[in-house]
């Protein structure tokens, strides 16, 4: 989630930016990043996260996020 990149997507007319993730249960930073991406791009931002655990890997949180243009 880079503001310069999402700004370019918005300028190119993107209506939706999809952000797949495989992250742990803490999503505070992702909430901030996705919200900022919606503001900067003027696009909807949707993010889904992998759910579960595989072997000895960390547990994935599974929480999805969605934001409207402008916040």
Image (spheres, grey):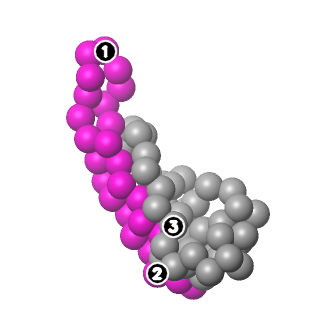
Tell me the crowding category of disc 3: few under 14, some 14 to 19, or many 20 or more residues within 10 angstroms, Cα based. Answer: many
Q: Which comes sooner in the sequence, label 3 or label 1?
A: 3
Looking at the image, which residue is at 71% across and 79% down? Answer: 11
Looking at the image, which residue is at 42% across and 66% down? Answer: 46
Tell me the crowding category of disc 2: few under 14, some 14 to 19, or many 20 or more residues within 10 angstroms, Cα based. Answer: some
| Residue 39 showing in the rendered view | no
Label at residue 12: none
Between marks 1 and 2, how big is the CA–CA gap?
36 Å
Label at residue 68: 2
Left or right: 55, with 22 as reference point: left
Secondary structure under badge 2? Answer: loop
Q: Which comes sooner in the sequence, label 1 or label 2?
A: 1
Image: magenta residue range: 45-71
Tell me the crowding category of disc 1: few under 14, some 14 to 19, or many 20 or more residues within 10 angstroms, Cα based. Answer: few
Q: Name the residue beneath numbered marker 3.
A: 17
Secondary structure under badge 1? Answer: loop
Q: Name the residue beneath numbered marker 1.
A: 56
């Amino acid at each position: 989630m880079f503001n310069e990149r999402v700004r370019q997507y918005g300028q190119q007319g993107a209506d939706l930016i999809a952000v797949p993730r495989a992250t742990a249960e803490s999503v505070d930073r992702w909430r901030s990043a996705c919200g900022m991406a919606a503001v900067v791009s003027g696009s909807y931002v949707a993010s889904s996260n992998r759910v579960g655990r595989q072997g000895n890997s960390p547990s994935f949180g599974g929480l999805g996020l969605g934001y409207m243009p402008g916040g």
